[in-house]
Image (spheres, grey):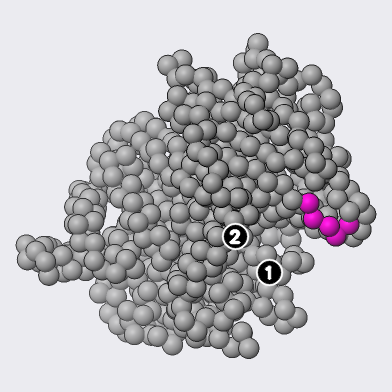
Amino acid sequence: MWNEDGLAGISDREQRLCFALALWNGRDPILKERLFGLSSAEGSRGESAEEFWWYVDAVPSSAWLSWRYHYPQRAFPYDLLVSENRTRFRGDPPFGLLDTGAFDDDRYWIVEADYAKAGPEDLRIRLRLTNAGPEAATLHVLPTLWFRNTWSQDPQVGRPRITAADGGVLLAEHETLGRMVLEADPGPDGLMPEQLYCENESAHRRPGTPYGKDGIGDHVLFGTPTVSPRRTGTKASFWYRIPVDPGETAELSLRLASAATPAVESSDEVLARRRAEADEFYDEVTPEGTGPDQAMIMRRACATLLWGRQFYHDEVRLTGLDRGGHVRVRDVVPVVDPWAWPWLETWESTLYAVAVAHLDPRFAKDHLALLLGDGWMSPDCRLPAGEQNLAATAAPIQAWAVLQVFRADGSRDHVWLVAMFSRLLLNHSCWFAGTDLAPIGPLTHPSNQVFDRSMSPVPHRYEAYADTSAWPALHCLAMRSLAEILAAHEPGFGDLAGRFTAGVEHFAAELAALELWNDHDGWYYDVVELGKGPSPRIRSLTGLVPVLTPAMIDSTRAGRILDRALDPGDLLSPYGIRSVTEKDLRGTVWLPFHLLVLDALRRLGRERDADDLAGRLLAPWSRGPGGRRPILGDQPWPDLLAFHDDVDPDSGRGIGHSHATGAAGLVAHLIAGGTGMRRCASTEK
């Protein structure tokens, strides 16, 4: 069971059959089926969702999932959010949903969805609907089932159907999934919900399609005859109308299961049992001595990580740059943020595997195997930077990640390690093939740079950055460690260790030849020659990357770089190390990169600095003066946590995507690994 794009959305592993909620408050101009947000062009701080929802709980098997959403009772201010944010510039404070007055007087609904598996094909669903407002109100709730449209583009694919069955049941039939049923209990009024059917196809795109995918919404809002009178289609909903008094809660119960699976336990029993098992699981994985608030933060971060996995199916032909071939991925993968378009990004995805290994080492290992497999690795053994930039080459941190995941899994799965080492050897070859590869990672994006290095180079402009040599050197260092581990079981691997040492030396010489080091300032500067006057010296986080490979530079130089990066009067903020950006030359704090920095600090024996930095990184989520958590800004619900990849270095407020798996992964990794506990212990008192 995996996350889908809808409200509290879930699907089977291949996203054939999907389930989610649709809501209507009686005032909105559209049915609420998706979470609303601003695009990069519309938002003053980039792309962001303008809603309040949370992944409250989850376990790796998805046997227990919990989700929460706050839905305004007033008409949702779609147009106001867009128009007001268009008037704001980069760096201006964003105009958010709270600023519109949508939640004034607490006029909103609390919608909670709990999922619990009674068996592999027996899912129990509990919906709780709380009226937080001062007056009685009615909420329209439409639990919705639909088939992902795989038939429109391929006539060989059979068309599935959802039809009405005896007992008020939705019967879903699919050629490979079989027969599934969605059963609904009566509402609080004792009445069975109405059933609505349409097709999961856009009528305007396929003229002649009866009862198109918007048919259910049009019927609920306007009473139009846009649902199938024959009660059949590829999308169907139960329609509840739920009046709730102020402060009261209504509850709905549903069951999604194989038609051949009888219900043995009651839903209440299944939900209680799975919740208790989740409590036991987190008691086991939470480090001893963790305070209750830190344990809650870790659990919410883990929930965001686990909800952040979606089915991904893409096949793209790569052309240009003499790197032809295909990307072929059809699997469940971690996405950057479940609200955003589900794209695969190699850097973020690799760091996700490191973080989730504390919870689900099997998934972490399988995902690294996918990234290093033939479906994602190009024919010339490069790893693409991501779906949106397939021609670029990802910064090679995968060997480091394999080492971290192997250790998190108890340093015992040598069969997997040999398989990964073999694939990494293929990727290793591309860095010595005589091609001019520029590794693309998070520090190449404009949110962390003065110039956007993730795009194609500008003609006739010379650019030089320390990380172009430092990332491959880190790869070689990690490969040497892997070879030494494997040599303990198979001596032949030991012969490769010297080769990887030579690789580190090669890239160290390459870095020295770039002449980026400034001995007076103790930093590797970026060089960008614009052809007009002296080249500017640019100090960004790329100058810190050589420290990640201590063997690449001498200890004195590494110490000077770290002293600057960890100086509160320089790059170090109360919430982590600042980057340098085109929007704000003091930079934001980009959280996932710190996983590598913390690892380097510990390898260099700077434990006190590592503990201090880990505490700063967790501080946005920890309660500050007045009990408020800096990451939430002015959000009035202090224990409902968001996870932003970027943090304002002065206030600790989150910026951009609010359910970013990279940030959630860092927080989970810090607490689950115990690295952030010592400095944060005082916050608990």
Q: Which mark is residue 664?
A: none
Question: Which residue is more in the foreground, 299 or 103?
Answer: 299
Picture layout, residue 255 above or below residue 476: above
Q: Which residue is mark 1?
A: 639
Identify the secondary structure beneath mark 2.
helix
Q: Which residue is mark 2?
A: 272
At 82% across and 31% down in the image, what residue appears?
221
Cα separation, mark 2 vs mark 1, equals 22 Å
Q: Is residue 492 left or right of residue 599?
A: left
Q: Is residue 4 left or right of residue 443?
A: right
**Quick one: label 2 or label 1, which is nearer the N terminus?**
2
Look at the image and say whether residue 664 sits in the magenta stretch.
no
Circle 2 residues within 10 Å: few <14, some 14–19, many ≥20: few
**Horizontal and vertical percent for residue 402?**
30, 61
Helix, strand or loop for the magenta stretch, by majority: loop
Picture layout, residue 44 above or below residue 315: below
